[in-house]
């Protein structure tokens, strides 16, 4: 079986441990997905939590999806939203936006758990410089299918005869898959590029074991059968290939180097939209 297994590198963001399989030297993108962070299970004592200070983006959409805990999203558009498990927090940076993500005050006081995913999707080249936007989609708005021991929730895009309300800007697949022990799921070829990430449990792709917490990139045009050896949870990402090469520099993504250079200069000079009420920010790395 000609699949590519990407073992993630371990990092930390604002004290939150993460695994990051994408981007890697082996694979720069899967469909529009250019960045994949698994925020590992973490316990925060009272008075502590995640605090990602004000920082900028261009040329991408960010999508945050939680399994445990809560995050407060604030951005330079005026958005102020608490994101709960199963919700989708969707921000399109376009020509430039700033945001913060932190544990809400109520959970800071009591202590909390955190576990989730954040992905970045590169914008189509014609929309890289679009106006920024934000939308929040509660868990109850996401379509699901539950049959024969397989529960599918469509986080974004379309697939498995479901369509998410998240306003993606190119053909996209992002699904949360939960299988009971012994259940099977056909992995179709409706999207050219696809990858699977095992969050927990043991599963086979045809007869090949999938490594837990690794990104498995599937060849185009080949169908597979996913089988659960135990109760397991995976996510599947994919979509149409990007319309050209993308460069990533810090928090900036673009097909045009001049847009990244301009964004770096503007952030360094303080010439950027600000998040209301925020004074602390992450400085441009040198």
Image (cartoon, rainbow, N blue to C red):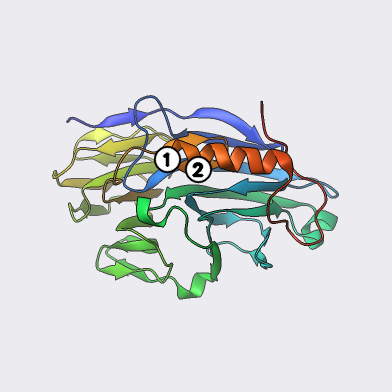
- Residue shown at 39% from the left, 24% from the top: 25
In the rendered structure, find residue 259 and report the number of the disc placed on it: 2
In the rendered structure, find residue 165 and report the number of the disc placed on it: none
Residue on which the image places disc 1: 256
In screen coordinates, is 204 left or right of 114?
A: left
Frontmost residue, 237 versus 275 = 275
Q: Position of residue 56 (x, y in %)?
A: 63, 47
Q: For mark 2, does the 10 Å Cα neighbourhood hold few (<14), some (14 to 19), or many (20 or more) residues?
A: some
Q: For mark 1, does the 10 Å Cα neighbourhood hold few (<14), some (14 to 19), or many (20 or more) residues?
A: some
Question: Is residue 143 in view?
Answer: yes
- Image height of 217 relative to 276, above or below: above
Q: Give the quadrant of residue 109.
A: bottom right
Frontmost residue, 164 versus 98 = 98
In screen coordinates, is 245 left or right of 18?
A: left
CB of mark 1 within 8 Å of CB of mark 2?
A: yes
Q: Position of residue 282 (x, y in %)?
A: 72, 40
Kindly state the secondary structure of the residue where label 2 is placed: helix
Task: State which quarter of the image contains the C terminus.
Answer: top right
Furthest toward the bottom, the residue is 141
Frontmost residue, 15 versus 252 = 252
Q: Position of residue 21 (x, y in %)?
A: 44, 33
Kindly state the secondary structure of the residue where label 1 is placed: loop
In screen coordinates, is 213 left or right of 101?
A: left
């Amino acid at each position: 079986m000609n699949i590519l297994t990407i073992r993630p590198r371990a990092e930390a963001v604002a004290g939150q441990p993460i695994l990051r399989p994408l981007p890697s030297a082996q694979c720069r993108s899967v469909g529009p997905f250019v960045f994949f962070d698994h925020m590992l299970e973490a316990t925060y004592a009272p008075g502590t939590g995640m605090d990602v200070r004000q920082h900028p983006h261009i040329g991408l959409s960010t999508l945050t999806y939680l399994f445990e805990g809560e995050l407060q999203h604030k951005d330079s558009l005026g958005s102020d939203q608490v994101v709960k498990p199963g919700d989708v927090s969707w921000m399109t940076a376009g020509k430039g936006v700033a945001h913060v993500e932190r544990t809400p005050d109520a959970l800071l006081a009591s202590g909390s758990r955190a576990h989730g995913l954040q992905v970045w999707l590169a914008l189509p080249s014609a929309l890289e410089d679009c106006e920024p936007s934000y939308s929040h989609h509660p868990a109850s708005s996401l379509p699901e299918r539950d049959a024969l021991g397989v529960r599918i929730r469509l986080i974004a895009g379309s697939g498995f005869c479901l369509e998410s309300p998240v306003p993606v800007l190119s053909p996209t697949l992002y699904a949360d898959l939960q299988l009971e022990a012994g259940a099977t799921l056909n992995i179709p070829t409706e999207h050219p590029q696809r990858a699977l990430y095992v969050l927990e449990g043991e599963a086979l792709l045809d007869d090949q074991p999938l490594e837990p917490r690794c990104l498995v990139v599937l060849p185009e045009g080949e169908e597979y059968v996913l089988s659960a050896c135990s109760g397991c949870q995976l996510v599947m990402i994919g979509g149409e290939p990007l319309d050209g090469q993308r460069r990533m520099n810090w928090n900036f993504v673009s097909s045009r180097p001049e847009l990244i250079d301009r964004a770096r200069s503007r952030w360094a000079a303080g010439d950027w939209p600000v998040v209301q009420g925020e004074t602390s920010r992450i400085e441009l790395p040198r």
